[in-house]
Image (cartoon, rainbow, N blue to C red):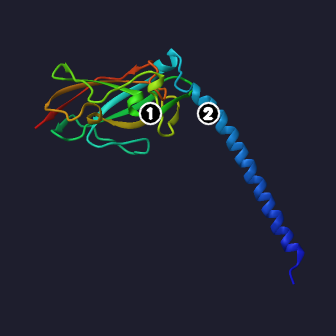
Amino acid sequence: MVTIEPMLKRLLVTFILLVLIGLALMNGVRRSSVFAQQKTLLGQLSAEERRAIQVVISSHATPYDFFTSGRVIEQSYFKLGEPVHIGLVMTNTARESIWVCAFSNDYYQNRPQLTRDGEAVAYSVTISDGPDACVITRTPDFVNLKPNVPFRARTIQLQDWYGPLVPGHYKLFLKRTFACCANGQWNSTNMISFDVTR
């Protein structure tokens, strides 16, 4: 014979759990809608906020991303056919945190400017600007850049932009936007150089 008291306890516990799950979901929906409203403003930084974000690039033989920990070794000499990855580190030099779009699509957020032996190298891909050109195919990664805390973004592989790099002496700087799509507001990085040899 089943007693009623243990069944009531189970029903009560189940009911409480369902209520808690429902409250958590409602809170999550409310937070995500508020965050979605904030996302439309993300990247629409003031000139002062943009100036406060320092973007430094470096060249590497291997890719890295947000989750790469430890020291990343820079490389300035590459063999013909070896991939050239460009690392990006963003640092907010302001006193307040700044929300930025850390990654949506390399072709929307970056404009590498590469020269070989003093001559500009043309992109091997077609790059379109403007709101109609922005098609987000994945959920963008947003980050709250805290004051004076370097943030390591995904690397950019130069061959994706320029095709195979032929031997020569290269110089590169990068223009980057903090919006998820190219919005015409670019920050320029430092200039780096590297060599491709046979």
Residue drawn at x 42%, y 20% is: 186
Q: Which residue is mark 2?
A: 36
Q: How many marks?
A: 2
Q: Residue at x 78, y 63 (%)?
A: 14
Pinpoint residue 140: horizontal percent, then vertical percent: 50, 36
Please state which amino acid type lies under the numbered disc 2: Ala
Give neighbour class at mark 2: few <14, some 14-19, many 20+ (Cα, 10 Å). Answer: few
- Which quarter of the rendering shows the C terminus? top left
User: The residue under label 1 is which amino acid type?
Assistant: Pro
Q: Residues within 10 Å of mark 1 (few under 14, many from 20)?
A: some
Residue farthest toward the left in the current orientation of the protein: 198
Image position of 116 (left or right of 95): left
Does 44 sit left or right of 61 as displayed? Answer: right
Specify the quadrant of the image occupied by residue 171. Answer: top left
Find out whether the residues at labels 1 and 2 contact each other: C-beta distance under 8 Å. no
Question: Mark number for residue 15?
Answer: none
Residue at far right of view: 4
Q: Which disc number belongs to residue 150?
A: 1
Residue closer to the observer: 111 or 58 = 111
Q: Is residue 36 above or below residue 177?
A: below
Q: Secondary structure at mark 2?
A: helix
Circle 1 SS class:
loop
Viewer-proximal residue, 133 or 31?
133
- Mark-to-mark CA distance, 1 and 2: 25 Å
Q: Quadrant of residue 182?
A: top left
* Vertical placement of residue 13 versus 86, above or below: below
